[in-house]
Image (cartoon, rainbow, N blue to C red):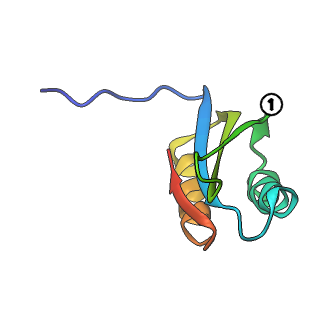
Amino acid sequence: MTKKEIKFPVTYDLKIIMTREAGDEENRRIVESVLNNLSINNGDWTNKFSSQGKYIRYSIPITLQSQEQMHQLYSSLNNIPFIKFAL
C-alpha cells in the first residue's frame, strides 16, 4: 500500500466535535481565533447537535497552504479542552 501525498494548497471540510459547556458562541470564538492566528481561510460554518445535546459538531470549509500549517492547526486544536475530536 502506498502513502498518498497531499498536494497544497488543499481545501476540505474541517470537522470538529466539541462539548457544549462553553456554549456555541464561545466555541466558535475559540476555533476562529486558532484559524485567524494561523491565517487559515474559512467559509460558512454548519453545526449539528448530538442526539442528547451534550456535543456539537462543526463543519468548516478551510484552505490550508502547507503541511506545516496543517500540523500547526491540529497541534493548536489539540490544546483546546472543549474539543473532543478534529478531523
Q: Quadrant of the N terminus?
A: top left
- Residue at 58%, 72% in the rendered image: 79
Towards the viewer: 61 or 52: 52
- Residue at 59%, 47% in the rendered image: 50
Q: Could you tell whether 22 is left or right of 63 in the image?
A: right
Towards the viewer: 27 or 68: 27
Image location of residue 60, percent across then percent down: 70, 36
Asked where in the image residue 19 lies, by quadrant, the reply is: bottom right
Q: Could you tell whether 3 is left or right of 75 in the image?
A: left
Image location of residue 32, percent across then percent down: 81, 53
- The correct choice, above or below, for 68 with respect to 41 in the image is below
Estimate how packed mark 1 is, as few (under 14), some (14 to 19) or many (20 or more) residues with alpha carbons within 10 Å: few
Q: Could you tell whether 43 is left or right of 61 in the image?
A: right
Asked where in the image residue 41 lies, by quadrant, the reply is: top right
Towards the viewer: 2 or 42: 42
- Residue at 54%, 56% in the rendered image: 74
Image location of residue 34, percent across then percent down: 74, 59
What residue sits right under mark 1 in the picture?
Answer: 43
Secondary structure type for disc 1: loop
- The correct choice, above or below, for 48 with respect to 32 in the image is above
Towards the viewer: 72 or 23: 23
- Residue at 43%, 29% in the rendered image: 6
**Residue farthest toward the left in the current orientation of the protein:** 1
Give the amino acid type for the residue marked by disc 1 in the picture. Answer: Gly
Asked where in the image residue 47 lies, by quadrant, the reply is: top right
- The correct choice, above or below, for 38 with respect to 13 in the image is below
The image shows a total of numbered marks equal to: 1
